[in-house]
Image (cartoon, rainbow, N blue to C red):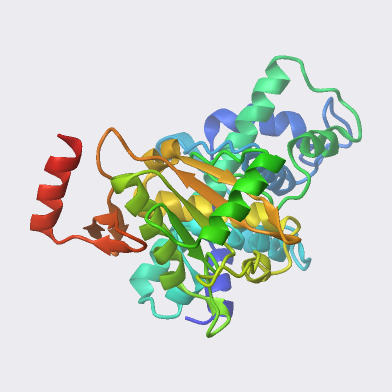
Amino acid sequence: MNSETFKNQILIKRPRYANSRIPIIQAFASKGKSKSEYSQFGPIYELYIYAFVLGLKRNLKLPLPNRNLTTEFIEVGKWKRDSTLVDFLLMIIFSHCEEIGFSWNELEDMEEVQLNVVINDIITFIESYANGGLEYLQKEYEDNNLLNSPYMFVDLLAESCGNIFDGEINCITLEKEDVDEDLITATVRLIEQGETSNTEFKSTLRVNLNTNIPDDKMELSCIKTLAGFMNTKSGTLLIGVSDKKEVLGLYTDFKSFGNKHDLLDEFQKHLDNLIEKYMGNSAFAVLTLYFPEIEGKMICRLDVDFRKNGPIFVKNKGVEEFYIRRAASTRALNPSEMMAYIENHWS
């Protein structure tokens, strides 16, 4: 399925909204009336799109109730017909493909059944965030917190975001710590000492420097290092530093995210997604993230604590893998080695 066919399959879908939202929709959509108490929106699709973006920016992802408690909306392709609004909306949605659960590379090789699952997941993504946005509006309306003015919706959205592509992901995120001079000095010292049993360097998070394109193997290599520290002893991963101790910075990774408003935020969100995908949300409890500037270049520093409450496994293509840290490398253990290691390390 080519990209145009993929898009057209989305455009014929009819998202749903909860019947319980009808009163708030009627309160804000003029539905052809010239005047009403809240008449800032005309067609319902405009309010629906607004609620979706508001939900996305406030990280209000709320699944719909059972199908018999929902109402079917008009086809996506009929929202503001003959305009670029729907294309703009799809661009927002596609910028969250990792959260939805697909990648563009995978789409090319998918069978029709798999593609239909992806398309349905996209519609569910729209419905959930629109429902969350509508719930927020409903609560604010019922609490009499909304000021009826021509700029009410613009002001509400401005409170929620600086740029609509900076949406928060729906998972626990790494906490970014402030960088002070002591941390910069300590980081420089780590680089000078080179890779050890508790220090690892990676040139990039996701870009293969041989091909200059994103590569899953690069990402998995960083994840394996983090898991190795968690299962062995505390350590530090520096991304943006070569194994020859050359400070490369994050510029190459930043470029891979395209023309986004906040590339540092995109980097962190992508890292968050990788950790959740491969290790689960429990891994975030032992990770601390910094972005120190060394030699005028920003790098990523991940301090990793030993996971005292038990081992962590890397979920790679449906298989759980177990990694430990050795002298200056990360190694996978086979099942018998893993059992003995876990018994000795956490007993």
Q: Residue at x 77, y 18 (%)?
A: 145
In front: 160, or 16? 160
- For residue 52, what is the image quadrant? top right
Can the viewer see residue 16? no
In front: 126, or 176? 176
Q: Give how far across and how far down residue 159 sits, in percent.
A: 78, 34
Placement of 184 over or under 260, stated as above or below: above
Placement of 90 over or under 16, stated as above or below: below
Can the viewer see residue 234? yes
Q: Give how far across and how far down residue 112 sits, in percent.
A: 37, 75
Q: Residue at x 34, y 44 (%)?
A: 233
Q: Give how far across and how far down residue 343 sits, in percent.
A: 12, 41
User: Relative to 96, is 294 on the left or the right?
Assistant: right
Q: Residue at x 58, y 49 (%)?
A: 73
Q: Residue at x 47, y 38 (%)?
A: 64
What count of labels does the image hold?
A: 0
Placement of 173 over or under 137, stated as above or below: below
Residue with the most extreme bottom position? 211
Quadrant holding the C terminus: top left
Residue with the most extreme top position? 143
User: Relative to 342, is 311 on the left or the right?
Assistant: right
